[in-house]
Amino acid sequence: MARTHHDEPSGSSTAWPVGVIARYRTIADATVDIQRTTEPDATWQPATTECTGCGTKRLFINIANAEIGTPANARTLTETEARDWAQQHSEKCRAEPKPTDVSA
Ligand SMILES: [Zn+2]
């Protein structure tokens, strides 16, 4: 009658790492995280994306200047590009995440 295992909740219940602003779930149940690494008012506004299935990483960056405008504009542009990539990648990536429990 006693339970020997905890039922692990499935789905997106794990805490997001610091700096992660968005997470997309792939068709193979991996995740694509978008992470921002600088202050909101920095001139350079980079964001990285990483797929936990296939390990693909991408860097997106926009710079606040005369053409793009304020740091907020650069950040919005970077996030839009990163989200577009994450959305497209999560729809086609079939790599499953590597199991983290190696003791089983
Ligand atoms: Zn992938």
Image (cartoon, rainbow, N blue to C red):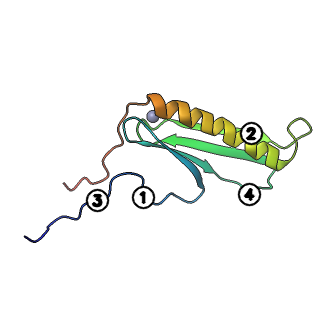
Q: On the rendering, which quadrant does ligand 1 occupy? A: top left
In what element is the residue under mark 1? loop
Q: Residue at x 68, y 38 (%)?
A: 80
- Marked residue nearer the N-terminal end (2 or 4): 4
The residue to which callout 4 is attached is 39
**Alpha carbons under labels 3 and 1: distance apart:** 11 Å
Give the spatial CA distance, label 1 vs label 2. Answer: 28 Å
- Please tell me whether mark 2 sits on a helix, a strand or a loop: helix
- Using the image, determine if residue 67 lies above or below residue 16: above
Q: CA distance from mark 4 to mark 1?
A: 25 Å
Label 3 secondary element = loop
For the residue carrying disc 2, how many other residues have a C-alpha within 10 Å: few (<14), some (14-19), or many (20+)? Answer: some
Q: Earlier in the sequence, mark 2 or mark 3?
A: 3
Identify which residue is drawn at 18% across, 54% down: 104
Distance, label 2 to label 3, CA atoms, is 37 Å
Residue at position x 48%, y 35% from top? 90
Q: Position of residue 86 (x, y in %)?
A: 55, 37
* Contact (Cβ within 8 Å) of mark 2 with mark 4: no
Please give the residue where the numbered disc 2 appears in the rendered image: 77
Q: Is mark 2 within 8 Å of ligand 1?
A: no
Question: The disc labelled 1 sits on which kind of residue?
Answer: Thr
Question: Which amino acid, mark 3?
Answer: Glu
Label 4 crowd (10 A; few <14 / some 14-19 / many >=20): few
Q: Nearer the viewer, mark 4 or mark 3?
A: 3
Q: Kindly identify which residue carries mark 1.
A: 14
Q: CA distance from mark 4 to mark 3?
A: 35 Å
Say whether mark 4 is within 8 Å of ligand 1: no
Give left or right: position of 83 versus 61: left
Residue under circle 3?
A: 8
